[in-house]
Amino acid sequence: MRTVRRLPVRTLVLQTGTGLVGGLALLTVLATTVGLGAAGWAIGVAYLLALAATLTRAVGRSGRTRLGPADAVTLTRAVLVGGLTALVADSFAEPAAAPVPVMVALASMALALDAVDGKVARRTGTVTDVGARFDMEVDAFLVLVLALYDVRLLGTWVLLIGLARYLLVAAGWVRPWLTGPTPPRFWAKVVAAIQGIVLTVAMADLLPRPVAAALALVALAMLAESFGRQVWWLYRNARPAAAPRERSRPRRVLAAVTTVLAVAFVWFALLGPGDAAGLGPTDFLRIPLEALVVLGLVLLLPPRWARPVALVVGGVLGMLTVIRLLDLGFRATLGRPFNPVADWAYTASFIELLGGSLGRVAATAVGIVLAMAIVGLLIALPLAVRRLTRLAGRDRMVTYRFVGAFAAIWLVAATTDLQVAPGTSLAAADAADLAYREVGTFRANLADRAEFQSELAAPVPVANTGRTPLAGLAGKDVLIVFVESYGRVAVEDPQIAPGVTEVLDDGSARLAAAGFTARSAFLTSPTFGGISWLAHSTLESGLWVDSQQRYDQLTNTGRPTLVSMFGAAGWRTVLDVPANRHDWPEATTFYRADQVYDSRNVGYAGPGFGFATIPDQYTLGFIQRAELAPANRPPVFAEIDLQTSHTPWVPLPSMVDWSAVGDGTVFAGQPEQAPAVDDVWADPSSVRVAYGKTIEYSLSALISFMLTYGGDNLVLVALGDHQPASIVSGDGAGHDVPVTIVSRDPAVAAATAGWAWQSGLRPSPEAPVWRMDAFHHRFLDAFAG
């Protein structure tokens, strides 16, 4: 005999229909206030119809004839989510017009009501499985919508937060045991709430995006831990329960190994150095104060608080460990520690650098591995701390004695400066020191943002008011040429300098014989080892731009630059960045160049060489053909990057006759026997040799260009952007880079005579040293008419 399912009665249909009408009313209000396009209407209406149909069917199949009070609250939340969904859908059509405040308000109200429906259900005695499922699905869809919007702010990876619930459902189709019920967990509710809150904060775009990305990454790690615990519970309970029995020997061994790994993870997190020079066994023989404090909290707090405290402490340790490891990499390359506020912005540049050195596929693989390692640390350390605190809580008397004994030892060691090795104190508080430093860094970034904002708001200094800007260069082509990684080490290091100085001294003699005057000095760059755009913007703007935060602030203003000033004075302005493989919005929105060249539009058809792929000789030859050679043209101001000397410094092209450069195919087959990148980088000495050779090549190309094409109307300013990485420059190297101005016109030499720069292309150790932003002002002052 067939069972006839009860159909939902009129009351239920009326209630869900009221929700549908309310949703349509909300869409109408949004359309008349902030605007709603076709995409928003289509997605919004489709969502509301699906909501009404699904809810009516689910409640009806459960045998109920109406929605409960809690269901009505959840339905209100679902309607708010529908309005948010419509606005997010619309934002993909017109991102700039997205009504972010309204979207944040809708998301916030939906999140706030999430704390209401459960309480209403419990107080009214109307808790049902359908209501719980309805609540969960609305939560999951809200997080998905928020993640979809935040992709443009944080990156595609944030979709993992929004898709987590649906990936688990999809996995249940393959493994049905994943769809089983699980006991309620308060921590799971906390984690779910955190996802929505973090994604809403990111949507508001009130925090610096690196900070928002870090918060989202922590939220993702918490979500992975929560889902992992749920899956593990389902796996362990998928089979019928068996009588309890003593754990087998393999399981006891596995438990012991897990405990040892937990100790190792936590010990490294507490004592691991932030400098590769500090990696030694004695660093791990110290007593970390933080471990004693956490164990003390486990003893003092009620047992129900032990787990949340352990997870929070583990999360903080995870973030600090990631920062420690990033400190290692930043000190090795950029000569400074990682800045957790500003330096996340360099992730894309890091992947691009790897792509230029290792290839796109390998770079993507490395990026994925690093991202997985970071997420793994953020998951593993909370679990490790939780395991150790749980073990400590089993025998509280032993833990009391342990903490008391080691706390006394720590106090004595700290008071007497007892050391386990010279310079290594037995009493340690490294993690606390690092946390304090990072808090200070965050505060310093906020203060620096305000300070730099005041500098941007100040009037642009105009030297010698009443004089005509750039009149002293009227009719002349002016080239500012940055030689990648051309630092002071290139002209002073005993291993590198001989070959470089030979090129410079020979070039000085040849240029002098051809009638050119060259004067040289040093500029102090705002960056070291990389991030060259900070140096470029400093020279161009006359402001000290030593962080990505300052760069972002600067490029969002209309501050005059050398490019824009030359353009306003009648020059054709050009930017040439041969390593760029994608659009560079600042080139036109901030620098305001007339023409931008990169790897895609210079017509290079030759082989690739290192990161930039395009040889410096081709870059200079292209500028000559495209910009300097045509007749009846305005004077040209060009900023050019010579990037053959960009890391990894191999393989290296050879000079050819300028008339044979053509489309670059002449470089095919060079060099005949190129050393592999891995072989060069296996030995610091070979890296330094490779670096020196690339600088020699870049300078040779520049000197040869001036001798071949330079005339009375060409002025060259050649300089480095920053010192090379620490593997070449060494520890403690400064930020100075050589700078040279070359011209055949005596008027140019006379205008710069007051600078007291040294004759020739090679500055000696006694040459003047200016800050790079100061050069901007003195250059404009020297050539004002």
Image (tube, rainbow, N blue to C red):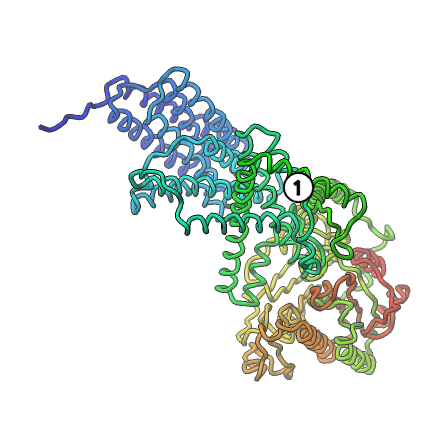
Image: 396 above or below 6? below
Apparent side of residue 269 relative to residue 372 in the rendered image (left or right): right
Quadrant of residue 167 within the rendered picture: top left
Residue 308 can be seen in this image: yes
* Foreground of the two, 397 or 289: 397
Q: Dot 1 surroundings within 10 Å: few (below 14), some, or many (20 or more)? A: some
Residue 60's spot in the image, x, y percent? 25, 24
Question: Which residue shows up at 56% across the image and 39% down it?
Answer: 392
Residue 393 vs 17, above or below: the answer is: below
- Across and down, in percent, residue 439 comes to 69, 41
Q: Which residue is mark 1?
A: 290
x%, y% of residue 277?
A: 71, 60
Q: Is residue 558 above or below residue 331?
A: above
Q: Circle 1 — which element?
A: helix
| Residue at 42% in and 23% down | 118
Q: Position of residue 129 (x, y in %)?
A: 33, 27
Judge left or right: residue 265 versus residue 766. Answer: left
Q: Residue furthest top?
A: 124
Amino acid type at image mark 1: Glu
Q: In the image, is residue 528 above or below residue 28? A: below
